[in-house]
Image: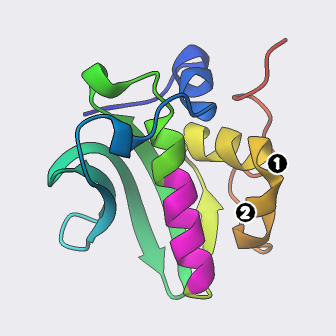
């Protein structure tokens, strides 16, 4: 996987156009603790990943990646939304250092409550996810 870094890549993933379930089969988000990555898997094949670190109850989102053949389908957004929902349910907070995660939260203000108020990371940055 290659991280999503450019503004065009980030914008291409923000608006879901196709769900993982419609690609080939059953989609799920798994937590690979050994590799510190949340994975979006379809039929047990990883197609996207979200690398993170943990400090206490706070998770720092470092980088989002999608295999090239699955890009532009909104799957990174599906992964990130699922992970943020999961972390909210667990009562955890996030620090945003991943440009895609930052753009996603700006585009989906319903996730603002998951961002750690003391250590928001790039939460106030508007560099990605906004067209000029």
The span shown in magenta is 80-89
For disc 2, the neighbor class at 10 Å (few under 14, some 14 to 19, many from 20) is: some
Q: Is 23 part of what is drawn in magenta?
A: no
Relative to residue 73, is residue 52 depicted above or below?
A: below
Snapshot quadrant of residue 116? bottom right
Relative to residue 108, is residue 29 depicted above or below?
A: below
Q: Residue at x 37, y 54 (%)?
A: 51
Q: Which mark is residue 120?
A: 2
Q: Which mark is residue 109?
A: none
Relative to residue 10, is residue 98 depicted above or below?
A: below
> Which residue is denoted by mark 1 in the rendering?
124
Q: Residue at x 46, y 40 (%)?
A: 76
Spot the residue most to the left. 44
- Report the Cα–Cα distance between label 1 and label 2: 8 Å
28 vs 96, nearest the viewer: 28
Task: Left or right? Give the position of 130 relative to 95.
Answer: right
Q: Are marks 1 and 2 in contact (CB under 8 Å)?
A: yes
């Amino acid at each position: 996987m290659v991280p999503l870094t450019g503004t065009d890549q980030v914008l291409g993933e923000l608006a879901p156009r196709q769900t993982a379930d419609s690609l080939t089969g059953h989609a799920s988000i798994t937590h690979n603790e050994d590799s510190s990555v949340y994975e979006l898997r379809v039929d047990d094949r990883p197609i996207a990943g979200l690398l993170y670190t943990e400090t206490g109850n706070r998770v720092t989102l470092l980088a989002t990646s999608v295999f090239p053949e699955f890009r532009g389908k909104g799957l990174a957004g599906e992964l990130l939304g699922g992970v943020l929902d999961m972390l909210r349910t667990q009562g955890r907070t996030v620090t945003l250092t991943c440009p895609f995660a930052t753009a996603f939260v700006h585009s989906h203000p319903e996730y603002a409550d998951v961002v750690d108020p003391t250590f928001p990371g790039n939460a106030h940055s508007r560099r990605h996810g906004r067209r000029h």
